[in-house]
Amino acid sequence: MLCHRAREVVGTSVNGDRPEILVVDDDRDLVDLLAFLIEQAGLASLVAYDPAGALEVFEKERPAVAIIDLNLDPWDGFELVGQLRQRSATLPIVVLTGLSKEEDKVRAFDIGADDYVVKPFGHREFVARLRAHVRRSDLAGDPQLPEVLEVGPLRLDVAERILHIDGEPRRLTGTEFRLLHYLMRHRGAVVPTARLAKHVWGYNDAPARDSVRVTVHRLRRKLGDDGGRRHFIHTVPGVGLKLRAS
């Protein structure tokens, strides 16, 4: 069962032009709480209680951000994250879960999550993170960005969010794109990890820095960056990252 708009759950008014946030969790009390926090933040909520309902809402409404629990039926949230990522390379996906193991975090990021929040969570911090992701979503089609960036064999099509390596296309997730785009704009310079976290995720805290680490690992695989013949992203210990032409 699903409810397309959270105002049917919490009794709020018509959402107008507010960015819509998709919340997917089978805990209805938590869904009501999240919907309330989202509405109080000046955003609008869309709700689904199962993966199939979430995909239906996504296709109809195209939300600005998705918040996904991992413990769902009949198939888990990991699969839902993957399905949503296949449908949109740019949708910010926030995992909100009680699973705190490192392997669960790595798996979620590998599948396509942009952020990972462990329950229980601070309400103010969560809203701040959510607003940051909305801002990132709003900037997705920024016309001020140059259309193409090139560093050695890397060619980044900004409008299409497609990376070409020696002419071969590689599609990037939203966070992979923003991280690589920022490094390409600052090619040859050491970019502090804190600045990367702030730019890509909108905040600089321990979870964001973990996200930087995992996203860089995933991006290196897509670049074919093996640290040997091809070595694009260089780590400067204790400082940050530097992008150079291989």
Image (spheres, rainbow, N blue to C red):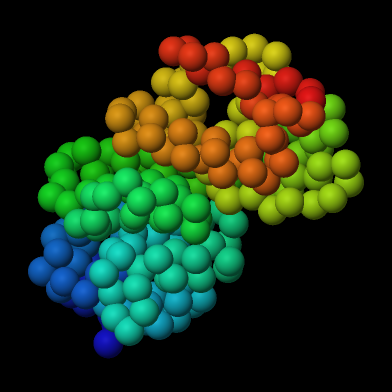
Q: Quadrant of residue 133?
A: top left
**On-image quarter of the C terminus:** top right
**Where residue 205 sits in the image (x, y, percent)?**
31, 28
**Residue positioned 72% across, 41% down in the render:** 224
- Which sits in the foreground, 233 or 180? 233
Left or right, 170 with reference to 167: left
Is residue 165 shown above or below 204? below
Left or right, 96 with reference to 139: left
**Where residue 39 sits in the image (x, y, percent)?**
23, 56
- Which sits in the foreground, 27 or 38? 27
Left or right, 35 with reference to 148: left
**Residue positioned 16% across, 71% down in the render:** 27
**Where residue 229 sits in the image (x, y, percent)?**
79, 29
- Which sits in the foreground, 228 or 195? 228
**Where residue 196 sits in the image (x, y, percent)?**
49, 26
Which residue lies most toward the front here? 228
Q: Is residue 62 visible?
A: no
**Residue positioned 42% across, 20% down in the render:** 194
Is residue 84 shown above or below 64? below
**Residue positioned 41% across, 49% down in the render:** 106
- Which sits in the foreground, 178 or 35? 178
